[in-house]
Image: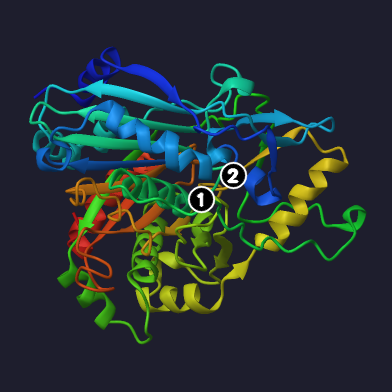
Amino acid sequence: MVSSTDNIHRLKSSMRLSSVAPATVTGRKVHELTNVDLAMKLHYIKGVYFFNSYAVEGLTVFDLKKPMVIHLLPLYFVAAGRIRRSETGRPFIMCNDGGVRIVEARCDETVDEWLAMAVEDDSTFDGLAYNQALGDTDLDFSPLVFIQFTWFKCGGMSVGISWANVLGDAFSASTFVNLWGKTMAGYVPHKSLHVPDWPAKPKLPLLVLPKVTPNALKRIDSVGDLWLAPNNCKMKTHTFHVPRAKINHFLSDQKFKVSAFEVFSAIIWKTLSKIKENPEETRMVTLCTNILREKEFESPSNGMVWSTVEADFWVAEAEVSELVELILNKREDENGMIEEMMGNTETGEKSSDFIAYGAKLTFVNLEEIEIYGLELKGQKPVYANYSINGVGDEGVVLVLPGPKCGKEGDGINGDRYVTMVLPENQLAQLKVELKRNWSIA
């Protein structure tokens, strides 16, 4: 079998790059970045959607681009902007219609063959969502969003999105993609987006705000104009599919009404604590959860809640139900602290940047993200998944809906996908333990 590295190399050799910009001139508006936005600046949301040939038959690249130009980007003009810095050095987005980068690629495999390879090696997806950090060429000219169309020999197609997290969270990225799909079907959206009413202003004067780094973040040396943090170990991605029946079994064992997210977080937290050489490293974990369902006409934002939870006992020896209860009742919200701490960087502490995902082992609740909301010619993706680039060494775990989860599927207890980005050696051991003890493979 051809390796995923060879496949990605062939994809890159076939790539064609272009840009699309709003049809109407934005007028060089300025989009100020919040402190939470800036805490996310070294991370990138990656999404991939696979469609069979029926969904894309007869579509051309022109057909795919046109709704972006006419309907989508006039609304999402911020996504077509570029990073600039104020006189104080604080980054902002200049809405200069620089455009969203479009990538076209062709693949010698079928959609089914590609998905079969991905079961064994998630790096197969790497070539389907263009990988370029802000500042990789020149920060002033780096696109915030890449959209990649990859055509397979069976006539199917994948849509890949690379979305700078400084622009908004995974829910914002998903809403953007879903609205594009609707405009492909002839839908004419509203003329403007609602701006969410957050974050609240810090209650303390700037000069007396605490300078302690929130537990959810890790302070690192400044990365300058290349917004990408280096890792100290090789990170690897893997996705588990967990069917509805197994999820219902897990949920039935719990004392409280919980979601699959809490149970998976507890199982993986416990298992990784067994694997770690120093169990103290996993006493505290980070949770990233959504307070509101994604809104179709909401401006991109980083609106997820960041919190931490700490165990005062050995996690490896705990019952899953104990950890679930801890996650439910003992989490400490850190959004306010992140806002305050990032505000302090304007008082002269400009030699630092921060990692959020992977600063501690991080669990991200994307159960309610509508990744199967993208439709082409009335067809949903046969498979969709999201991941995160720029993850710190402690790793990240994302809990995502499967194709039969949601309003039109099997309800809240439908299938789930659990996507992990972890140090390679830990991931290998985790896969063995989850299969042996929990029949998750």
- Give the residue drawn at x 69%, y 60%: 199
Let me know if residue 218 appears in the view. no
Would residue 429 be found to the left or right of residue 42 on screen?
A: left
Amino acid at pointer 2: Met
Asked whether 222 or 394 is in front, the reply is: 222
Q: Which mark is residue 40?
A: 2
Residue furthest top in the image: 13
Determine whether label 2 and label 1 are within 8 Å by CB: yes
Please identify the quarter of the rendering in which residue 284 is found: bottom right
Let me know if residue 289 appears in the view. yes
Q: Secondary structure at mark 2?
A: loop
- Give the residue drawn at x 45%, y 54%: 171
Q: CA distance from mark 2 to mark 1?
A: 9 Å
Question: x, y percentage for residue 320?
Answer: 36, 73
Position of the C terminus by quadrant? bottom left
Amino acid at pointer 1: Asp
Q: Secondary structure at mark 1?
A: loop
Q: Which mark is residue 153?
A: none
Mark 2 neighbour class, 10 Å CA radius: few under 14, some 14 to 19, many 20 or more: many
The relative height of residue 3 versus residue 437 in the rendered view (above or below) is above
Asked whether 97 or 210 is in front, the reply is: 97
Going from N to C along the chain, the mark reached first, 2 or 1, is: 2
Mark 1 neighbour class, 10 Å CA radius: few under 14, some 14 to 19, many 20 or more: many
Question: x, y percentage for residue 330?
Answer: 56, 76
- Give the residue drawn at x 54%, y 29%: 230
- Give the residue drawn at x 68%, y 55%: 214
Question: x, y percentage for residue 227?
Answer: 59, 30
Asked whether 363 or 69 is in front, the reply is: 69
Residue assigned mark 1: 169
